[in-house]
Image: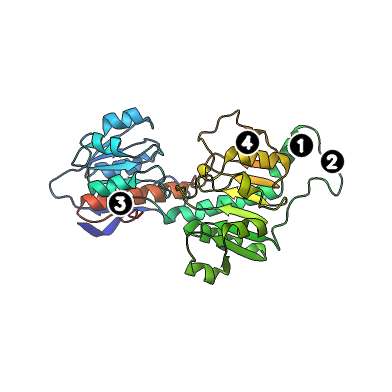
C-alpha cells in the first residue's frame, strides 16, 4: 500500500522549482515489471523506479521497439504520442494492470479498449494547465503584434521608420473567445486578467459554473467566432471537434481577428486556415499544434508572415516535465500497490 511519506527527488533544475515527489509504495516480495517507452527523461527518476521495480527503458520512441519490449510488463509509463491501442495491450499480455500517459489530451488512446479489458488508465491533466496557458498568451501577443513578420522585415532590410508601419491588434478592450472552458481554457482566462479585456466568451458542451465566477459568457460557436477579436482553441480533439475550424467557420470571424490553437492540430482544417491567412479572412494565427507533427519543413504554414508556428512546446518547461513524469509514475505505482491511479482518465 501507499505510504504517507514521499521521497524527494533531487534533480539538477533551478532552485526556484519545487521538487516533485515519487511516493514510496510497498509491493511485498514482488518486483513489478515496468516499461518506460522513452529514455529522454532524468536518469534519477529511473533510478528511483529501479529501487523496487524491474524497469526496461526504450532507447527511442520507435513503435516496433516498444512492441518488442512490452511483453510481460505489469505497468507502462507511456511517454510518446504514438497510438496506444489493442495492439500494444495484446503485445503486453494479460498481466498488464495499468498504463499512464504523460499527456492531458488522450485522442491517441483507445480508452474503450482499456475499459473493456479492465486495465487502469492514467494521464496528467491539471499539471499542463499553466504552461499551456502561458504559451497561448505568448502566441496571442506574437501573432497580434506581428513578431514573425517583423523579424522577416529586419532580415530583408525592409525596416521602415514611419508611424503606421507594422500596426498590430490591441488586446486591451478586446473580446476574447475560448473554445473549451476546461482547465486550460480557465487558466487562459486567468492569465488574461491583467490585459483589461472587455469581454470573455466561451463555448463547449455545456455551461461551466467556473465560468460565472470568471465573468465568462456561454455562447454558441458561431456567436463566439463572429464577436471575438481573439479566439483560443483549448478543447479536446474528438469526432465532434475534428475540423471544427474550417472554411465556413473561419469566414464567420472578423478580418481583424487572431486565432490561437494550443489543443490539437486536427481541430483546424489546415488548408482552409492557410487560405484564410493568405486572403485576409482573418488577421493572424498562432499555432503550437498542427497536423501532422512533425510538420513538413515545406508546409505552406511556414511561408506565411502572419502565422506564428512553434513545435508543440506547450508543456516544454523543466518544471512541467518533472511534474508530469512524477504523476505518470505515481499513477502506475499506485495501481501496482493495490490502489487507484492518482490521476485516472475518465472518458
- Near mark 2 (Cα within 10 A), the count class, few <14, some 14-19 or many ≥20, is few
Q: CA distance from mark 1 to mark 4?
A: 18 Å
Residue to which mark 1 is pinned: 153
Crowding around mark 4 (Cα neighbors within 10 Å: few <14, some 14 to 19, many 20+) is many
Q: Nearer the viewer, mark 1 or mark 4?
A: 4
Between 2 and 118, which is closer to the camera in this rendering?
118
| Marks 2 & 1, CB-CB < 8 Å contact | yes
Quadrant for the N terminus, please: bottom left
Q: Report x, y in % for residue 76.
A: 29, 42
> What secondary structure is marked by label 3?
helix
Identify the residue position indicated by label 2 in the image.
Answer: 160
**Position in image of residue 318 (x %, y %):** 47, 46
The answer to whether mark 2 and mark 4 are in CB contact below 8 A is no
Percent coordinates x, y for residue 13 in the rendering = 45, 47
| Comes first in the chain, label 2 or label 4 | 2
Q: Position of residue 33 (x, y in %)?
A: 22, 40
Numbered circle sitting on residue 301? 4
Residue 283 in view:
yes
Task: Identify residue for label 3.
Answer: 331
Q: Earlier in the sequence, mark 2 or mark 3?
A: 2
- Please tell me which of labels 2 and 1 falls first in the chain: 1
The residue lying furthest to the right in this view is: 162
Q: Which SS class for mark 2?
A: loop
User: Around disc 3, counting alpha carbons within 10 Å, would you say few (fewer than 14), some (14 to 19), or many (20 or more)?
Assistant: many
| Residue 16 seen in the current view | no
Amino acid at each position: 500500500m501507499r505510504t504517507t511519506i514521499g521521497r524527494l527527488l533531487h534533480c539538477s533544475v533551478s532552485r526556484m522549482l519545487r521538487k516533485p515527489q515519487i511516493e514510496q509504495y510497498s509491493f511485498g516480495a514482488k518486483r513489478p515489471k515496468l516499461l518506460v517507452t522513452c529514455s529522454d527523461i532524468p536518469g534519477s527518476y529511473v533510478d528511483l523506479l529501479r529501487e523496487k521495480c524491474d524497469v526496461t527503458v526504450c532507447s527511442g520512441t520507435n513503435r516496433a521497439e516498444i512492441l518488442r519490449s512490452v511483453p510481460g510488463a505489469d505497468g507502462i509509463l507511456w511517454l510518446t504520442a504514438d497510438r496506444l491501442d489493442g495492439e500494444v495491450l495484446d503485445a503486453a499480455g494479460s498481466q498488464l494492470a495499468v498504463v499512464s500517459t504523460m499527456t492531458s489530451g488522450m485522442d491517441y488512446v483507445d480508452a474503450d479498449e482499456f475499459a473493456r479489458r479492465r486495465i487502469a488508465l492514467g494521464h496528467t491533466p491539471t499539471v499542463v494547465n499553466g504552461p499551456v496557458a502561458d504559451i497561448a498568451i505568448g502566441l496571442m501577443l506574437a501573432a497580434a503584434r506581428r513578431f514573425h513578420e517583423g523579424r522577416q522585415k529586419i532580415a530583408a532590410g525592409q525596416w521602415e521608420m514611419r508611424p503606421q508601419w507594422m500596426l498590430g491588434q490591441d488586446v486591451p478592450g478586446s473580446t476574447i473567445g475560448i473554445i473549451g472552458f476546461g482547465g486550460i481554457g480557465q487558466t487562459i482566462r486567468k492569465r488574461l486578467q491583467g490585459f483589461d479585456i472587455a469581454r470573455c466568451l466561451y463555448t463547449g458542451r455545456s455551461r461551466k459554473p467556473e465560468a460565472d465566477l470568471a465573468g465568462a459568457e456561454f455562447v454558441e460557436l458561431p456567436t463566439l467566432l463572429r464577436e471575438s477579436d481573439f479566439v483560443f482553441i483549448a478543447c479536446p480533439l474528438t469526432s465532434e471537434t475534428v475540423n471544427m475550424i474550417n472554411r465556413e467557420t473561419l469566414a464567420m470571424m472578423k478580418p481583424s481577428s487572431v486565432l490561437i490553437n494550443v489543443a490539437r492540430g486536427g481541430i483546424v482544417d489546415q488548408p482552409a486556415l492557410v487560405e484564410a491567412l493568405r486572403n485576409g479572412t482573418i488577421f493572424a494565427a498562432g499555432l503550437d499544434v498542427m497536423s501532422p507533427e512533425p510538420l513538413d519543413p515545406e508546409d505552406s504554414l511556414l511561408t506565411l508572415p502572419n502565422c506564428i508556428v512553434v513545435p508543440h512546446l506547450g508543456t516544454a518547461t523543466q518544471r512541467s516535465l518533472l511534474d508530469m513524469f512524477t504523476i505518470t509514475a505515481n499513477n502506475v505505482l499506485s495501481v501496482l500497490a493495490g490502489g487507484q491511479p492518482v490521476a485516472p482518465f475518465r472518458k
